[in-house]
Amino acid sequence: MRRGLILAIRMRLEIIGITGLPEVRPGDDLAALIGQAAAQQGQPIDRLVVLAVAQKVVSKAEGAVVDLRGIQPTALARSWAIQWGKDPRLIELILSQSRRIVKMDRGVLIVENRLGFVCANAGVDQSNTEGDDFATVLPQDPDASACRLHQALGCGAVLITDTFGRPWREGLVDVAIGVSGMEPLEDFRASRDRRGRPLAATIIAMADQLAAAAGLLMRKPDGCPAVLLRGVEWKAAEGSARSLIRRPEQDLFR
Amino acid sequence: MRRGLILAIRMRLEIIGITGLPEVRPGDDLAALIGQAAAQQGQPIDRLVVLAVAQKVVSKAEGAVVDLRGIQPTALARSWAIQWGKDPRLIELILSQSRRIVKMDRGVLIVENRLGFVCANAGVDQSNTEGDDFATVLPQDPDASACRLHQALGCGAVLITDTFGRPWREGLVDVAIGVSGMEPLEDFRASRDRRGRPLAATIIAMADQLAAAAGLLMRKPDGCPAVLLRGVEWKAAEGSARSLIRRPEQDLFR
């Protein structure tokens, strides 16, 4: 009976969107803003909680916002922009945030960005900025951003999330681009199935599963860039989203 | 005050793992087993709930289990199996479940399976089977499997989930391979940001985000193949996981 009770408790997760954050501006203390909004909502942030924060507000608070008027597009950026009806300054910014072009076709620009993540447009985004002359880029070091929030808020772990496409499947999903306090990959290869056979190929991208779960609440009209996840079991570690990047020598799709 | 209360309620999801399912066998009434286990756990299944069920138990209940002793491997299957230390019968089964080989390199077999999903090993799996001579394949028609559970249990929507790898990122995530009662993609392009700018590129793979969230509870040692998600807002529709498959003419990574 008691075991059943414990199991039932462990088998329940809660995902809570923190509402009421103000428009975030460069220099804002994001940890303080999230902490205050959570407190106002009666949601204490403690060591049992995983906090997921959307990249966009982290970039804004850190001033990772670029004024496109200061950008001189190269010939490559101009030619691509003209061909596909894009802003050449924006294309130039995307190229400057990239270290390898993975695919440049039909107006789509998939790159390995300066952090090593393969994604569209290197994470450069114009939504929720101050107008057509501004774009956000990814935080300088999303792991460090996660670590600062982790320490300031005293939560169990922090994920910085962004919204990525995937080959072969339609639609975007949220993934982790910054991690603090958690091993982002969980290795179940030592686990065995009910018949004692070792489970094959079961390294699970826990941080990405959590990011996707948090993403279910992040896309509300009011904006909900911070999400708490309670009831999660995770492997405590310093953690880094770099663990989620496939090493070139193991990547069959470079 | 009242608006705040409503918001707070909407901004909270609950994910509940249904424990205590028996070992599922061919011919079992999976809907009945899930309904009974949920009831025993005091978790009513109603129209407000999304039910996610792991592919493995669906395949088992539907008898999608193959006795490898009846398989005659082709030369291709034998040669690949010898080169990489695999069971040639298993390779033959994988090939028979495929309609296109996407990548066959370094012992890894990524295929477009007969349903159109691109994944490793066509979804063929030996874990939790009756021994080395048996493997499960994906359900014949996972949308139809989802639809049957949907109708039998009277829940809001049903997802059949499986665990897939991704290019460029380490670790597996859970995705939807069968959908009933929900539009698997949610289109936020009509939405506008706080400044009135239309949100770009924001078709979200809701069904995959939900599958990933459910996956957080599916990998417990006791096995937890059925998960309830409460508090989710979704667009009701007949639904099909085929919507999640990128059309060849739009796929830059074929």
Image (cartoon, coloured by chain):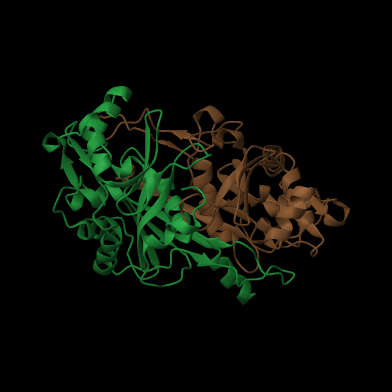
Chain colours: A brown, B green
Q: Residue furthest left?
A: B70
At 18% from the left and 44% from the top, the residue drawn is B65
Q: Residue furthest bottom?
A: B2
The image shows residue A30, relative to residue B35, as above or below, that is above
Q: Residue furthest right?
A: A70
Q: Quadrant of residue B134?
A: top left
Residue A137 in view of the camera: no
Residue A57 in view of the camera: yes
Q: Is residue B51 left or right of residue A23?
A: left
Q: Which percent across, then down, holds residue B185?
A: 47, 64
Q: Which percent across, then down, holds residue B192?
A: 66, 70
The number of discs equals: 0
Q: Is residue A245 left or right of residue A55?
A: left
At 40% from the left and 33% from the top, the residue drawn is A188
Q: Which percent across, then down, holds residue B49?
A: 38, 65
Q: Which percent across, then down, holds residue A47?
A: 59, 41
Q: Is residue A67 left or right of residue A82?
A: right
Q: Quadrant of residue B75?
A: top left
Q: Quadrant of residue A1?
A: top left
The image shows residue A102, relative to residue B29, as above or below, that is above
